[in-house]
Image (cartoon, rainbow, N blue to C red):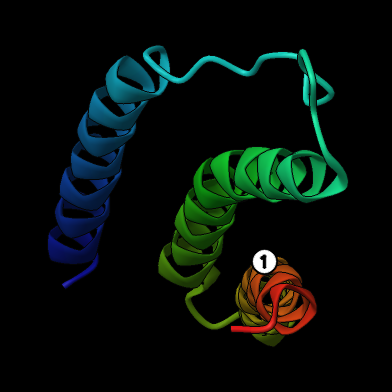
Amino acid sequence: MKIVLQNFGMICVATMFTLFAVFIGEATAIEIGNPLGRGATFQTIIKNVTQWAIAIAVPLTTLMVVIAGYLYLTGGAKPEQIKKANQALTWAAIGFIIILASASAATLIRRILEGR
């Protein structure tokens, strides 16, 4: 059973590395420019900053989920490692929710101020 779990863990890690490489390949197409830009207004600055934050948060959240999964797989009968995995997964989710909520709040505030 231990060998099966080790093989499963290796397959999961290999799959995650492959997916991560694909995302990195796509992420190189993202260009993070100067958020102030030419003739920028307050709305465009907020929009650019929130887009930049989401572009950074998605790979970091993916990395944290992979790390938490690794901790789960290698935790076995170690309750402290399972607890670390739970905390890593919880804080990754909380951080991602905060980033998405801030982007949504910025959009909501912009629409209220524009009168839509």
Residue furthest to the front in view is 115
Where residue 57 sits in the image (x, y, percent)? 62, 50
**Relative to residue 80, is residue 66 drawn left or right?**
left
Residue type at mark 1 is Ala
Instruction: Examine the image and state in which quarter residue 100 appears.
Output: bottom right
- Say whether residue 84 is visible: no
The structure residue drawn at horizontal position 87% and vertical position 46%, both measured from the top left corner, is 42
Of the pair 111 and 28, the residue shown nearer to us: 111
Left or right of residue 18: residue 77: right
27 or 111, nearer to the observer: 111
Image coordinates of residue 26 in percent, x first then y, are 29, 23
Residue 55: percent from left, percent from top:
56, 40
Tell me the crowding category of disc 1: few under 14, some 14 to 19, or many 20 or more residues within 10 angstroms, Cα based.
Answer: some
Please tell me which residue is depicted at 47% across the width and 52% down the height of the picture: 62
Number of numbered discs: 1
Q: Quadrant of the N terminus?
A: bottom left
The residue shown at (25%, 54%) is 6
Disc 1: which residue: 103
Q: Is residue 16 visible?
A: yes
Q: Is residue 3 left or right of residue 88?
A: left
The residue shown at (68%, 38%) is 48
